[in-house]
Amino acid sequence: MKPCQKMPSIPDQVRAACARVAARARAVKVEEDAIEGYAKGLEPTPPAARSIGGGRESRTAFVICLDAVNFGSGWWPTIRKRPGLSGYATIEAGLAERVEAAGPWSPQELTALDASRIAAVLGQDEDHPLMERYAASLRDVGERVSGDHDGSFEAVVEAAGGSAPALATLLAGWDAFADMSTYDGEPVPFYKRAQIAAADVDRMGVAALRGLDELTAFADNLVPHVLRVDGVLRLDPELERRIDAEELLVHGSPEEVELRACAVHAIELLSNALGREMPPAEIDAVLWNRGRAPRYKSRPRPRCRNTAY
């Protein structure tokens, strides 16, 4: 009788799938000759982490709820942004103010959340398409915390046993953190938000987790844009034209999957070139911060409306 084989963690599944896509990609290519030189120019940048007051349960609830709604970049041009803040920072600020003023929503309150309530917190119109999507994601969080973790957000983190990959794997099983595409008929897991939630638990001081270096890059639209501008990703001319014309990409289309997967794979190669001294998640943070500079903001980035990123 063969011994039972342990299922690969979510980060390992993401890493393997993105390497497969990168090897077959038709519209996006990783310029592997550029990897070594580009890696040498990367300097560690401590990721910004919002400080939230309150006890550990409150802070844990904030992190999980924030990353449950850490999507919507395709809609950012259509939301009401706070002065000087990006779309993501606008959403983060609204949730943080709610927690600091009244504490986090309880799991029971989350299960009853609707578009109008989340819109009021975020300063948006309740009929904006993102509001019901956010409410649905937070309702799922409430149901999971209530049904699987006795109503305790801290218990969610404790169930991972101090492991970042284990926490990402746990969250990936929730509808709120679902992020799976297909490519050439094969599944491609990304789980951007499940992994970044594990990183944020550590960054925001909720719990010290081991295995952060095992996480992959967090597949979104900004990091591929930075890698494209910097010459690490080369795009098919037609895809470049569509992005430059600010056409929305279709979520799950081959081109959109390739952009995300090739960015993840390129960051794995960059980390390898540095002897893994800078883990993929750390390189991701460096590139994400770099993407806020005028050089990158002056050019259209790929946009796609979905609940993954």
Image (tube, rainbow, N blue to C red):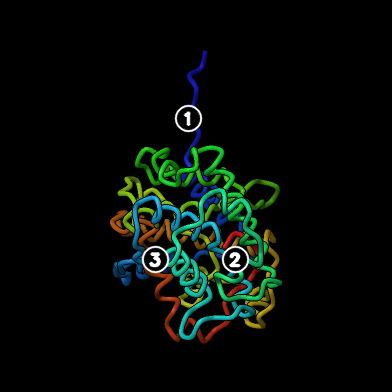
Between 45 and 100, the residue placed more toward the observer is 100
Residue 247 location (% of width, % of height): 69, 77
Question: What's the amino acid at mark 3?
Answer: Ala
Looking at the image, which residue is at 61% across and 65% down? 117
Q: Is residue 263 above or below residue 21?
A: below
Question: What's the amino acid at mark 2?
Answer: Ile
Looking at the image, which residue is at 59% across and 45% down? 143
Horizontal side of 188 relative to 194 (left or right) equals right
> What's the CA distance linking mark 1 and mark 2?
40 Å
> What's the CA distance linking mark 1 and mark 3?
30 Å
Quarter where residue 135 is shown: bottom right
Determine which residue is flagged by label 1: 6
Residue 2 location (% of width, % of height): 51, 17
Between 55 and 267, the residue placed more toward the observer is 55
Q: Nearer the viewer, mark 1 or mark 2?
A: 2
Q: Is residue 301 above or below residue 198?
A: below
Is residue 26 visible to us here? no
Determine which residue is flagged by label 3: 285
Horizontal side of 16 relative to 135 (left or right) equals left
